[in-house]
Image (cartoon, rainbow, N blue to C red):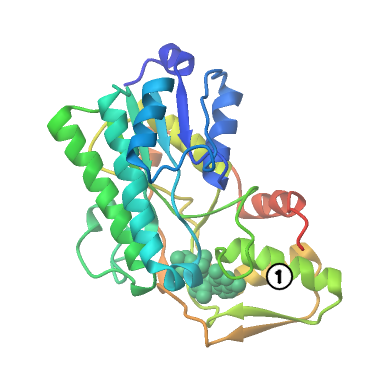
Amino acid sequence: MTNKIDYLNGRHYVAGHRGMVGAALHRALINRGATQLPTRTSAELDLRDAAAVRMFFETERPDYVYLAAAKVGGIWANMSYPASFIYDNLQIQSNVIEAAREFGVRKLLFLGSSCIYPKLAPQPLKEEYLMTGPLEPSNEPYAMAKLAGMSLIRAYRKQYGCDFISVLPCNLYGPGDNYHPQQSHVMAALLRKFTEAVQQGRTEVEVWGSGSPLREFMHCDDLASACLFLMENYSSEDPVNIGTGTEISIKDLALSIAQATGFKGNLKFNPDYPDGTPRKVMDSSKLLSYGWAPSISLTKGLNSTLISLPGFD
Ligand code: GDP
């Protein structure tokens, strides 16, 4: 287990600190009292460049690393840019993990995703169901990269004795999400669509697919809290699911967002867009058994995220 005092006094590098998850980790560390947090924006440090990453680690010497940098996006983005989703993520994670080994990082946390489970795995998804069947085709390249990242974590533990761990979050949302109309995930996309519809007095909002897929949503501040908990209390090659255990259909999510935004018009489901995987709810009993539990309900998280929405052009 990680020594608490040493941990908070250490140097923490959150790779991807300007993304939603990285920013939540950064906030959580500062709230907990960490003061040494070297950062680089993607303009300052291209994590796909191995030499640049190595130089950064040599200069900043982080003790604890949170690998939240990744090319991410919703179902449309994954289907439109499959090569970038696998190439960028393979490069980023390989470079950061190798540099962390070379420069003696004390502990590293790698963020995987619930989308790496087989498309038709039994539900709720238990960690042991990984790699037992074919992946959902819409995000297979992204999932392959994340599976490779978890394999790197296991291999570096085994060969070098590095204290590196992997976590698998469910669908995430919160402040700082990507609100791009096409490339975002469903929560951000619908928050934007309904807010704009109300502002512009429109009477219809398009929801992709059938509305029947089931998803599990967690606020990014709960995820950050779970990650810090695991950094202090967990050390194993086995990945840990991080979810709320509560699922909601896309239709019900859309209705909740309609209500929260005050939208009174109609939902138009567009079957020309794919549903993706029919259901992905995770079994998070392992994490719960260690003594961590989420604290932000979907209603509370949705309302606070709504208040924090940026202006849209
Ligand atoms: P996924 O969880 O990997 O499938 O990624 P998404 O968050 O992009 O999509 C989740 C589900 O929401 C899929 O069934 C989408 O078809 C559906 N969905 C409905 N409306 C939208 C939308 O406006 N944007 C996105 N990204 N998904 C939507």
**Viewer-nearest residue: 256 or 38:** 38
Tag 1 residue: 193
Residue farthest to the left, as pictured: 159
Q: Position of residue 242 (x, y in %)?
A: 42, 46
Q: Position of residue 162 (x, y in %)?
A: 23, 28
Work out which quarter of the rendered image holds the C terminus and state it: bottom right
Three-letter amino acid code at the position of disc 1: Lys
Which residue occupies 57% across, 63% down?
Answer: 184
**Viewer-nearest residue: 133 or 178:** 178
Relative vertical location of residue 115 with respect to residue 221 in this rendering, above or below: below
Relative vertical location of residue 246 with respect to residue 181 in this rendering, above or below: above
Q: Is mark 1 within 8 Å of ligand 1?
A: yes
Q: Position of residue 50 (x, y in %)?
A: 33, 39
For this view, does 243 lie left or right of residue 204? left
For this view, does 263 lie left or right of residue 104? right
Say how many tags the image has.
1
Which residue occupies 23% across, 43% down?
Answer: 152
**Viewer-nearest residue: 300 or 203:** 203
**Viewer-nearest residue: 32 or 45:** 45
Which residue occupies 33% across, 48% down?
Answer: 91
The quadrant holding residue 187 is: bottom right
Residue farthest to the front, as pictured: 51
Which residue occupies 82% across, 70% down?
Answer: 198
Q: Secondary structure at mark 1?
A: helix
The quadrant holding residue 233 is: top left
